[in-house]
Amino acid sequence: MNIPDGKARLGLLLVILAVLALTVGGLLRGGILHMPGQQIVGKQKIALSIATNLEPVSLGNFKNGFASVIEPALPAVVNISSSRLVSRPNNLPGTLGGPLFRQFFGDQAPQPSRPQAEREYSLGSGVIINPNGYILTNNHVIAGASEIEVFTQAQKKFKAKLVGADPRTDIAVLKIDASGLPALTFGDSSKLKVGDLVFAIGDPFGIGETATTGIVSATGRAMGGSIEHYENFIQTDAAINPGNSGGGLIDLHGNLVGINTAIISRGGGGNEGVGFAIPANMARNIVQQIVENGKIVRGYLGVTIQAVGPDMAKAFGLPHGGGALIGDVQPNGPAAKDGLQRGDIVLALNGKPVSDADDLSVEISEMTPGTVAHLKIYRNGETLEKDVTLGTYPQSGQTSPQSNSGAGAALQGVQVENLTPQMAQQLDINSQTGVVVTAVDPSSAAASAGIQRGDVIQQVNRKPVANVTQYRQALSGIGRQAVLLLVNHQGESHFVVVEPQ
C-alpha cells in the first residue's frame, strides 16, 4: 500500500472535510438533526396549513348533520399518555422519630422515612398540525413528564419527544417519528363571533376520538391566571371533559380555531357548558417560535397594569370603564424611556381599542421586540399619543430544551427567600443561615426528590449558602448536572441529591 506524501494527505483530508460539511449541512437544511434520546432544539422550519379567504358556510349544506366536517378532522386527533416520577410523603405520624420518642426509645425510635418515588400517569389529547409528526397540545398535559406516548386513530403507538413548551400560554409541541399523517388546517380565530358553531374534538377519559358540538359563547375571556399568564380564551358550550385538554376546537370548515384547555366545574369534574380554548392564532405563533427559534420571544412594555372598572374610571374622570391602568413603570424599561407614567390609562394600541388589561398584555406579547407600539393614553383629563419601542420580555417562566443551561436545571421550579430569624422561629429551626423554600413546582425534579415548601437549604454541593445571593452563585454554571443539597426539614438536616429531569 502506497502512503501518500504530505500534500496528498492534506488534499485527501480537505476532500473528506468537505463531504462531511455537505452532509451535515444537508441534514440541517432538512429540518431535524438530533442524537437519539435528545430533545429537538429548534432552528428548523415547520410547514403549517393555513386557511385563507373562506366564504361563510350555509347550514343548508348540512342535511343530515355535520359528518362531512368532523370525519376528515378526527384522524388528526391523538391520545397522549404521559408519566412522571413524583414523591409521596411517608404515612408515619409526624411525632414518630421526633425528640419526644427519642427521649424514651433512644436509637430504637422509628425513624421517619424519606418520601417514596412513584410513577404518576395522565391522559390528554393533541392534534397533528404537520404531516411529518408535529403535534400541538397543552403544556399541562405533559408538564414534568419523563415519558410521553402518542396513540393515533389508526391504533399506532409512538414515543414522542418534547420539542418545546410555553407555560405562559399552556402550549406544548411534540414530535413523533412518522410521515404522511393527516393534519389539521389552521383557521383565523380572530374572526370568530359569539354564536358561531364550533366542534370540540379530542379523546376524553381515554375512550377514543370524540366530537361534541356547541357555539362560541364568548371571546377574549380570562380566568384570573389559573392556568395561563396570557389569557385570551374562546369560551364555548361544546362539551369539554377530562382528557379533552390539548384537543382541537374546529369551525364549520373543519379548520382548527382553538386548543381545548379548561372547564369550569362545580366540583364534579365534568362538563357544565363552560369550556375554554386557546385561540388558534396565538397557538400558531407559539408553535412557529418553538420549532423555528427554540424559544419564545415576546414584546415587552415594562409596566404593571390592571383593569379599569366603573369605579376606577370615575375616580380618574373617564366616562366609562375599559382600557388598562398603569400601576407601575419599570425603571429604565421601554415604557419609562418613552415617557409613560404611573396612572396613565392605555385606551388603544395601534389604533385598536384596548378593552382591558388582559387585552393589552396579550397584544403586546405577540408583537416583535424592537417594533414601535402606538399608544393612545388618558392622562390627567387629556388624551395623548405615545410611541413606545418594545423591548424583549425576560425569558424566565418559559421552558424549552435550551432553557436549562447555566442556571441549575435540577432546581428549576424552586423559589427561595432569605431565612430571617422570624422564619426560623416559625419553622422551629435552630439554624439562622440558609435559604427557605417558599414554593416548589410539583412537576419539578426537586419535588420528585422530596424538596418541600418550608425546607431550608443550607448547602449546595457542599458549599454553605447563607442567603439568596450565595445560593444563586453556588448554582451558577451547574447546567444540567445533579446537585447535592444539605436540607433542614422540620428541624433535622439531611442530604438530598436532585437529578435534572
Image (cartoon, rainbow, N blue to C red):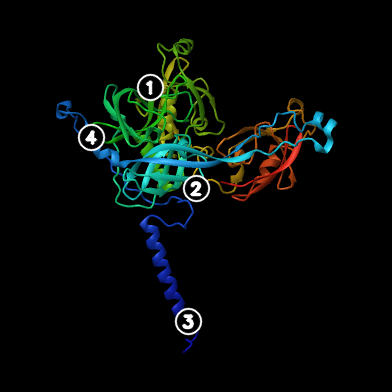
Q: Residue furthest bottom?
A: 2
Q: Which residue is mark 4?
A: 69
Q: Is residue 264 above or below residue 467?
A: above
| Residue 9 badge | 3
Quadrant assignment, res 424: top right
Q: Nearer the viewer, residue 102 or 425?
A: 102
Left/right placement of residue 320 relative to residue 89 reads: left
Residue 374 point in image, percent of width and height: 39, 30
**Kind of element beneath mark 2:** loop
> Which mark is first along the chain, 4 or 3?
3
Left/right placement of residue 379 relative to residue 420 reads: left
Label 2 to label 4, Cα distance in Å? 36 Å
Residue 135 point in image, percent of width and height: 37, 43
Task: Report the amino acid beneath label 3.
Answer: Arg
**Kind of element beneath mark 3:** helix
Q: Which residue is mark 1?
A: 274
Which-is-in-front pick, marks 1 and 2?
A: 1
Label 1 to label 2, Cα distance in Å? 34 Å
| Residue 401 badge | 2
Residue 70 point in image, percent of width and height: 25, 35
